[in-house]
Image: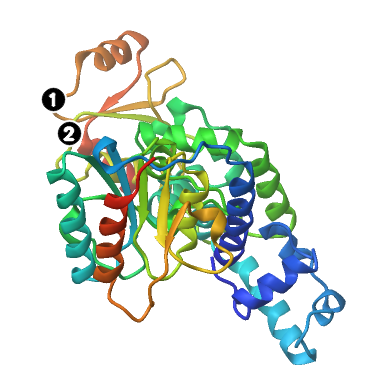
Amino acid sequence: MSAVAEKLLRLRTNKLLKANRSKRETVSYEEVKEIGILFTIVDRDKHNAIKKLAKQFKEDGKKVEVLGFLGKGKENYDFLYNYISSADISALGKMTSGSAITFAQRNFDYLFYVDLHPNIYLENILAMSKAKCRVGIYEKNKNDFFDFMLNISREKKISALIDQMYFYTKKLGK
Amino acid sequence: MDIDSLGYRTIEALFDKELVKNPADLYQLTTEDILTLEGFKELSTKNLLTGIDNSRQVPFERVLFALGIRFVGKTVAEKLANYFKNIDAIRTASYDELIEVPEIGERIAESLIEFFKDEENFILVQKLKDAGLKLSLDETQETLVSERLLNKSFVVSGVFETFSRDQLKETIKKNGGRVLTSVSSKLDYLVAGNNMGPSKLNKADKLGIPIISEQDFINMLKE
């Protein structure tokens, strides 16, 4: 049933995207108070890159919340952040994780989705999100998931995406 | 709960043709339905239907886990299945009855109640049951070790030397007995361990319920 649940999750995500009427806007970096980061746990390098990004935002005086996705057989490095897994959807494809639902309800000034390849579980959170501006890598047909997309090669390291996210967000304003 | 021969592409095709809208619909598929899917021939159709049919043999605890109830992982599903024996008993259990299960806490009890309150989930469970999935323990899984304690009820209280409290309760059930949580006139025995609270002891004494030690209990099993 799990493959069917994933298909149903995708369908629910599309519905959530259409139903989400949250106000989107860009906030100048100086005024940013809260930032969310979503990412799939891949390896130690990526984990360290996320830690570094969160640290950078905190040093800039922002409040940061991180939520990861832990796939089967992956290690949860340092147990620093809340995470969800494939066990967090019901057989009918409903997100059941309280952490994910709470995260989606947060009115972040910016929500960064730091993955080079889409993850259907995290896309479900993006679709529900009330963040003012959702930032992620450019992908055709994913316009509804993001308010700001960065067009970089997927061949590059995750640090390249993170660097660009940080660089351009600092340049964004009202 | 994965089904052999049912991959992502097949699911996409089944949804596109609106042959499947939820997991229970898989069990209504016919050869004719599957042959309408692109790329499916006689053998692949047969393999898919066999895979779906085989999933009807998946044990209750794994089906329960596959429902994706929040906080109900493999181990919790196993404990719930062994304790309640079937899905309806879990569905209708009260909060107090749920937290009575060893290692089931408030968080899991609340999540179970929430899950079964949702009509969509209730309908899914009914459909899966109608489709022949195992939503109760097999008789072989329920086989008793003996019937020495058949129809006898026990309340277990205190700390024991040979058994842990959970082991003692399990032993009662495996020998046909019932485990109750409170002392009443319907109770047959109070199994008293060390450091037990005085209230159960006093009540059992007042009601004339036999109070037995751990050793008395072991002797009962040998009779």
- Which disc, if any, is residue B111? none
Residue linked to disc 1? B195
> Which three-letter amino acid code belongs to the residue tagged 2?
Val
Mark 1 vs mark 2, CA separation in Å: 6 Å
B88 up-or-down from A46: above or below: above
Q: Quadrant of residue B185?
A: top left
Residue B223 appearing in the image: no
Give the mark nearest the N terminus, 1 or 2. Answer: 2
Question: In this image, A18 relative to B14: left or right?
Answer: left
- Secondary structure, mark 2, is loop
Mark 1 and 2 residues: CB-CB less than 8 Å, in contact? Answer: yes
Where's the N terminus of chain B, which quadrant?
A: bottom right
Q: Position of residue B223 (x, y in %)?
A: 34, 46
Say if A129 sits above or below A136 in the image.
above
Displayed quadrant of residue B118 = top right
Q: Is residue A126 left or right of residue B101?
A: right
Q: Is residue B173 left or right of residue A140?
A: left
Give whichever of A103, A174 is nearer the camera.
A174
Q: Residue at x 14, y 29 (%)?
A: B194
Residue B40, horizontal then vertical, whole percent: 76, 86
Q: Which mark is residue B159?
A: 2
- Identified by mark 1, the residue type is Asn
Q: Chain of mark 1?
A: B
